[in-house]
Amino acid sequence: MITGTLSSPAEVPKGGRMSICTARTKKGLRCTVNAGPSGLCHVHDPALQCGAPTSSGRLCTVATGGRGRCRKHAEPATPARRVLVDPQASAAAQSLAASLGFLHFAGASSAHVTDTLSAAVSRWGQQRGFQVKREVRAPAEARPDRRGYLDLVCFDGPRPVMAVEIDRGNKQWSHDKLAAVAARGVAAVWLRWGSKTLPDRIADGVDLIHMPMHRTRTEKDIEGSWYSDP
């Protein structure tokens, strides 16, 4: 995965020459725009792009200068109405919840919701300079008789700083993996979406983020489609 940080306008080196963006254009040519601290220009730096999920499953690459969504994907609704997080949760969990609040689903499949949330979490981590990896081996103490993997883990160099599990239901296995991570001093976030009742008890150190959603079913659509709650 590509990592990135929020960039500021490029500074002119002492020699008087500005560095040039290292990216390639859609035609395969070398970009000639001045680069920022990341080595990329304001057009090609992922941290300075819209980043909203598109209908194709990819992230929008419209340059916004790091000021959020582009005009097409701007979400007027207040994030807090769609994402719930404990006020006592860690600053990182609250920041992640705020970034997810701009997502909106209408007629989405379960797979699409999960994929979109995974992409959004990855981008949140990348914007903070973390390397984000998927399917990372969980601590052995989570359950000695079972091998487990965490959905996403943010790394600061070789050091894991946050682990995230994304679930529609209250999977005890997900909780146990996160509890083991939290016991090691790593931030642990359980991202729960859907309409099911939330778990009664959560281990210390595990922050819960809930995205309330409802599902509609028809005779032709047995699995149903998901919609963000207003």
Image (tube, helix red, strand yellow):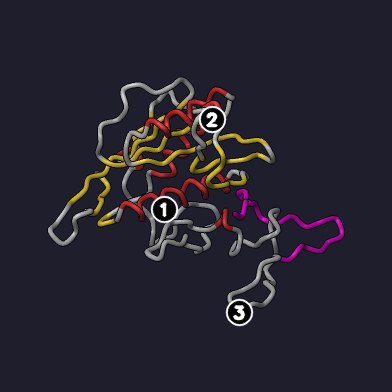
Residue 169 at x, y percent in the picture: 32, 38
Q: Earlier in the sequence, mark 1 or mark 3?
A: 3
Q: Tell me the residue at 22%/45% (across/down).
A: 214
Magenta segment, prevailing SS (helix, strand or loop): loop
Q: Secondary structure at mark 1?
A: helix
Residue stretch in magenta: 1-20
Q: Report the side of 61 relative to 85 (left or right).
A: right
Q: Is residue 4 above or below residue 159?
A: below
Q: Is residue 131 above or below residue 31?
A: above
Q: Tell me the residue at 46%/39% (across/down).
A: 96
- Residue that badge 3 annotates: 27
Query: Which label is found at residue 115?
Result: 1
* Tag 2 and tag 1, C-beta contact below 8 Å: no
- Residue that badge 2 annotates: 187
Q: Tell me the residue at 61%/55% (across/down).
A: 2
Q: Report the side of 222 relative to 114 (left or right).
A: left
Given the current orientation, which residue lies at the most extreme right position?
15
Distance CA(mark 2)–CA(mark 1):
22 Å
